[in-house]
Image: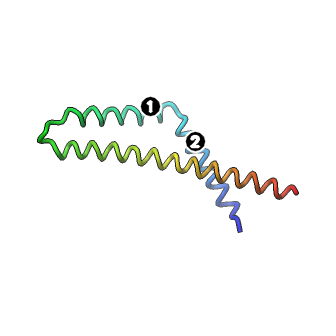
């Protein structure tokens, strides 16, 4: 049985995630931080292994956060489609 409440929550969260993805300041923040980490990473000295690893980790975490938000948005799109389909079935 389909849980319409869960689908509605997922669709709402997905809509919010879509808004974040499209928000200029949000995008800029990720782009600026990514470039900042890459720039800092590239100027480390050969002996600064820990610093390089920390910058690498920061870049990976940034990508993980972006991917999570994209996943929430995708789940929301699927939930919305399922809700739309249910609405069509209820009209039959």
Q: Position of residue 82 (x, y in %)?
A: 70, 55
Assign a secondary structure to mark 2.
helix
Mark 1 or mark 2: which comes first in sequence?
2
- Tell me what residue is drawn at x 24 percent, y 37 percent: 41
> In this figure, what is the number of numbered marks?
2
Note whether 38 is above or below 86 in the view shown: above
Q: Is residue 49 left or right of 85 when viewed as pictured?
A: left
Assign a secondary structure to mark 1.
helix
Q: Which numbered circle lies on residue 18?
A: 2
Q: Position of residue 28 (x, y in %)?
A: 44, 31
Residues at marks 1 and 2, CA–CA distance in whole angstroms: 15 Å
Q: Which numbered circle lies on residue 7?
A: none
> Where the C terminus falls, by quadrant?
bottom right
Q: Quarter of the image holding residue 35?
A: top left
Q: Residues within 10 Å of mark 2 (few under 14, many from 20)?
A: some
- Tell me what residue is drawn at x 53 percent, y 40 percent: 20
The residue lying toward the viewer, choosing from 32 and 48, is 48
Q: Position of residue 72 (x, y in %)?
A: 55, 50
The residue lying toward the viewer, choosing from 42 and 15, is 42
Q: Is residue 44 left or right of 86 when viewed as pictured?
A: left
> Where the N terminus falls, by quadrant?
bottom right
Q: Is residue 26 left or right of 39 when viewed as pictured?
A: right
Q: How is the image coloured?
A: rainbow
Is mark 1 in CB contact (under 8 Å) with mark 2? no
Note whether 69 is above or below 26 in the view shown: below
* Residue at mark 1: 28
- Tell me what residue is drawn at x 75 percent, y 51 percent: 84
């Amino acid at each position: 049985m389909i849980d319409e409440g869960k689908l509605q929550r997922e669709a709402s969260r997905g809509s919010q995630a879509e808004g974040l993805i499209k928000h200029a300041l949000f995008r800029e923040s990720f782009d600026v931080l990514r470039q900042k980490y890459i720039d800092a990473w590239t100027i480390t000295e050969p002996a600064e292994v820990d610093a390089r690893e920390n910058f690498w980790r920061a870049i990976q975490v940034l990508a993980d956060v972006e991917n999570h938000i994209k996943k929430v948005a995708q789940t929301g799109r699927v939930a919305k489609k399922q809700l739309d389909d249910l609405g069509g079935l209820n009209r039959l």
